[in-house]
Amino acid sequence: MDSGRGDTCRWDIRGAFDGPEWRIKLTANHHGRRADIVVSVIGLRYANGHAGLKIIIDCPDTPIVTPAEARQLGTALIAAADAAFQGLIEGST
């Protein structure tokens, strides 16, 4: 599992949140296709102070994953949830 952006979470001057990203590189399925899964954290902070963060799970087709890849996906989702929670805390100050 690769973390392309590292573990940094940043709010920009406009109130957009650009959080970390994790890439799960999948092995080829029975059709020979590879479709990596990317888990990202993004969000917005509104003028009233409310912040909304979302976790995106992106992949071009329905992946068929091995047990090891499923564990990587689970780890990435937990890390993304932690980053989103931390971003909400940092965004509220």
Image (cartoon, rainbow, N blue to C red):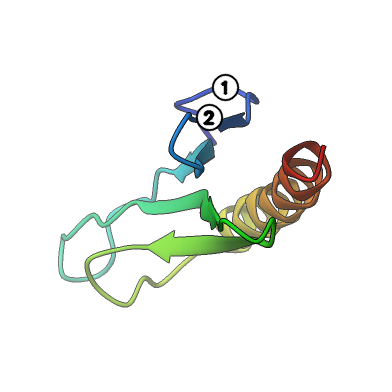
In the rendered image, residue 17, in percent from the top left (x then y), is placed at 52, 42
Which residue is at 79% across, 52% downward? 85
Dot 1 and dot 2 residues touching (CB under 8 Å): yes
Task: Give the left or right position of residue 44, taking residue 52 as reference.
Answer: left
Q: Looking at this rendering, what residue extends furthest in the bottom direction?
A: 62
| The C terminus - image quarter | top right
Which of the labelled discs sits on residue 3, or is there none? 2
User: Seen from this angle, which residue lies furthest front?
Assistant: 48
Q: Position of residue 9 (x, y in %)?
A: 63, 31
State the residue at coordinates (22%, 66%): 60
Q: Amino acid at mark 1?
A: Gly
Q: Residue at 43% of width from left, 38% of height from top?
A: 14
Q: Is residue 48 left or right of residue 31?
A: right
| Of residues 12 and 84, the one drawn nearer to the viewer in this rendering | 12
Q: Quadrant of residue 90?
A: top right
For image coordinates 49% across by 49% down, the residue present is: 40
Q: CA distance from mark 1 to mark 2?
A: 5 Å
Name the kind of residue labelled 2 in the image: Ser
Tell me the tag on residue 68. Answer: none
- Tell me the SS state at disc 1: loop
Q: Secondary structure at mark 2?
A: loop
- 22 or 85: nearer the eye? 85
The picture places residue 52, in percent across and down from the top left corner, at 62, 63
Q: Quadrant of residue 71?
A: bottom right
Task: Tell me the quadrant of the picture where the N terminus can be found.
Answer: top right
| Residue beneath disc 1 | 6
Query: Is residue 74 or residue 90 the one in the foreground?
Result: 90
Residue 31 sits above or below residue 72 on the image:
below
